Image: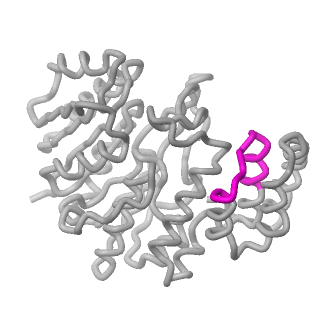
């Protein structure tokens, strides 16, 4: 018997794209005979998304649809954990409310599940909303599809779980067996949960990497990727990728504090110039610096000598001076190319 699959979609004020996402999903579901569960969690939308979801009547017969309406905005992490808890199948694939499954993407995922992996990490194409064009044909470049049975080799090759929500498929029943860990991140609970699963399953680990793009992801003009507004509470304003990378690096450091061979395979450590570059960009965008922020950065980046030589001074620079330093970004790109430094 083939493993079963749940597709989960957390949504919040997605009326611009949710109809297109659902229609795309229905098309993909209609192309397979497998019985598939779909769980949509609406995080108290106020733009018409809820009305649209309540009127859904185009679901194929091979699909069991459940829609959960939060009674208030509980945040993205709550919606993800709700989907994990509610899933009744072997595997869970969570996709964004404005992302679409590529042609044959569902069939590729279902085929990969026949090997009963712990975790599947897929590729993606990236569409930019502003230009309405594909700006990246492959999130992973030319890296070939492959399987991993060792966590160290997986991190060394791919750097860990994919930060793009829609590229991750995991053994949800195995995850449900794990005691719910204390949430360490404000924004990245789905990566936390995947890490918990990989660590718990390490003795019988099978990770499948699929280089064929299984989804098309949208970078929204006014989405959090550009504005940093990740939830209604305004808990963070992004300054470049500063808080994203800081929080994820903290998470990896906590999970693998006694396993440096894994911790230092995380992408931020692959690029010699990444940390000072991130700090300079953040400061140029007006990152407010205080003792707490310097303490967090120091704790997680202390082993980087460029953090001390360039990063710390960059945090203390006037914003205008940090802006002027960005004119020399081309030198970093030349050094990366010259020395073959990986950035993923």
Q: Residue furthest front?
A: 291
- Relative placement, left or right, of 58 versus 244 is left
Examine the structure image and report whether residue 37 is included in the region drawn in magenta.
Answer: no
The quadrant holding residue 116 is bottom left
State the image coordinates of residue 153 (x, y, percent, origin top left): 49, 76
Classify the position of the C terminus by image quarter: bottom right
Q: What colour-coding does the image apply? A: one colour
The quadrant holding residue 180 is bottom left
State the image coordinates of residue 327 (x, y, percent, origin top left): 89, 43
State the image coordinates of residue 89 (x, y, percent, origin top left): 14, 53
- Residue at the spot x=31%, y=15% of the render? 48
- Residue at the spot x=21%, y=66% of the render? 174
66 versus 194 height, above or below? above
Classify the position of the N terminus by image quarter: bottom left
Q: Mostly what secondary structure, the magenta segment? A: helix
261 versus 4 height, above or below? below
Pick whichever, 109 or 308, lies toward us.
308
Examine the structure image and report whether residue 286 is included in the region drawn in magenta.
Answer: yes
The residue stretch that appears in magenta = 277-293
């Amino acid at each position: 018997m083939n493993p079963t699959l749940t597709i989960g979609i957390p949504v919040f004020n997605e009326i611009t794209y949710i109809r297109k996402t659902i229609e795309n999903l229905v098309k993909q579901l209609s192309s397979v005979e497998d019985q598939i569960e779909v769980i949509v969690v609406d995080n108290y939308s106020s733009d018409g998304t809820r009305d649209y979801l309540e009127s859904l009547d185009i679901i194929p017969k091979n699909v069991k649809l459940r829609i959960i309406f939060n009674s208030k905005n509980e945040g993205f992490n709550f919606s993800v954990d709700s989907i994990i808890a509610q899933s009744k199948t072997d595997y869970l694939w969570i996709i964004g409310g404005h992302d679409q499954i590529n042609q044959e993407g569902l069939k590729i995922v279902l085929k990969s599940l026949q090997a009963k992996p712990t975790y599947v990490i897929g590729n993606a194409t990236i569409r930019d909303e502003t230009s309405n064009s594909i700006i990246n044909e492959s999130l992973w470049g030319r890296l070939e599809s492959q399987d991993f049975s060792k966590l160290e080799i997986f991190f060394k090759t791919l750097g860990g779980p994919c930060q793009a929500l829609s590229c991750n498929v995991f053994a949800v029943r195995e995850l449900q067996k794990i005691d719910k860990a204390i949430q360490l991140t404000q924004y990245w609970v789905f990566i936390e949960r995947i890490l918990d699963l990989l660590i718990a399953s390490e003795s019988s680990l099978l990770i499948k990497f699929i280089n064929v793009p299984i989804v098309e992801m949208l970078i929204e003009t006014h989405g959090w990727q550009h504005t940093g507004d990740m939830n209604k509470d305004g808990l963070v304003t992004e300054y470049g990728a500063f808080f994203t990378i800081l929080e994820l690096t903290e998470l990896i450091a906590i999970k693998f504090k006694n396993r440096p061979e894994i911790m230092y395979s995380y992408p931020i450590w692959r690029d010699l110039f990444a940390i000072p570059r991130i700090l300079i960009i953040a400061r140029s965008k007006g990152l407010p610096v205080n003792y707490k922020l310097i303490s967090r950065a120091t704790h997680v980046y202390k082993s980087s000598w460029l953090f001390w030589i360039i990063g710390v001074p960059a945090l203390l620079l006037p914003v205008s001076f940090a802006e002027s330093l960005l004119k020399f970004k081309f030198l970093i790109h030349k050094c990366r190319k010259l020395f073959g430094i990986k950035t993923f």
